[in-house]
Amino acid sequence: MLELRPNCELCDCDLPPHSDQAMICTYECTYCANCVETVLQNACPTCGGGFQKRPFRPQKSWRVELKLGLQNHPASSARRHTEFTSEDIVAHVERIKRIAPQIVRGCIRKGAPARQNWIENPTHPVGRSLAYGSVILRSADAHSYCLPTSPQTGRAHSK
């Protein structure tokens, strides 16, 4: 179960349970959307993975017998702060910011080339539209991979 941490671990701004600005990595490191975009550039300073919006936990238990919701499982009140210095974060982000987390930092293909070496491959037999919208990419070594696309641009996520 997610802790729903109460603050950005970098700038310490409040991120209440229903904040649409809370972003988390797969280890639940929690940062505000502004820090993720402007400082971290979608690279978690701890694990190197990308971030997603933190989901909301309903206030009440809609299935009373399950005892769910914030009324039964409240958000954490323990404030956390990153253990890394500003200099370390800048160096870490600079080292990996050009690598798409879905390809290299993620689990699709470790050691794949940086994102600028990838090109869209609309002629791939699978095509370009899968369940939630995706694009097939082909690396310089001609291997193809499927990545989710951005709802705003229709292009593969590049951060």
Image: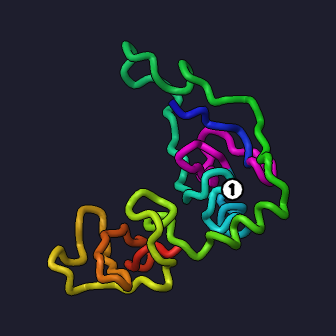
| Foreground residue among 7 and 102 | 102
Q: Quadrant of residue 102?
A: bottom left
x then y, percent, for residue 112: 44, 72
Residue at 40%, 79% in the rendered image: 155
State left or right for residue 60 relative to residue 44: left
Chief SS of the magenta region: loop
In the image, residue 141 sits, relative to residue 79, either above or below, namely below
Q: How far across and how far down the image is residue 121, in percent? A: 29, 85
Which residue is rendered at x = 55% and y = 59% of the image?
50
Q: Is 15 one of the magenta-colored residues?
A: yes
Residue sitting at 80 percent across and 61 percent down?
A: 88
Give percent across and percent down for residue 19: 62, 47
**Looking at this view, is 156 or 109 the one in front?**
109
Give the residue at the far top of this rendering: 65
Q: Is residue 146 left or right of residue 113?
A: left
Position of 64 with respect to 47 (left or right) is: left
Rendered image coloring scheme: rainbow
Q: Give the secondary structure at mark 1.
A: loop
Residue occupying the point 37% across, 81% down? 139
Q: What is the total number of numbered labels drawn onto the structure image?
A: 1
Residue range (magenta): 9-30
Quadrant of the snapshot with the C terminus: bottom right
Identify the amino acid type marked 1.
Answer: Pro
Q: Is residue 54 above or below residue 146?
A: above
Confirm whether the magenta stretch covers residue 109: no
Residue 152, percent from left and from top: 44, 75
Above or below for 48 versus 158: above
User: Which residue is denoted by mark 1 in the rendering?
Assistant: 45
**Crowd class of label 1 (few under 14; some 14 to 19; many from 20; radius 10 Å):** many
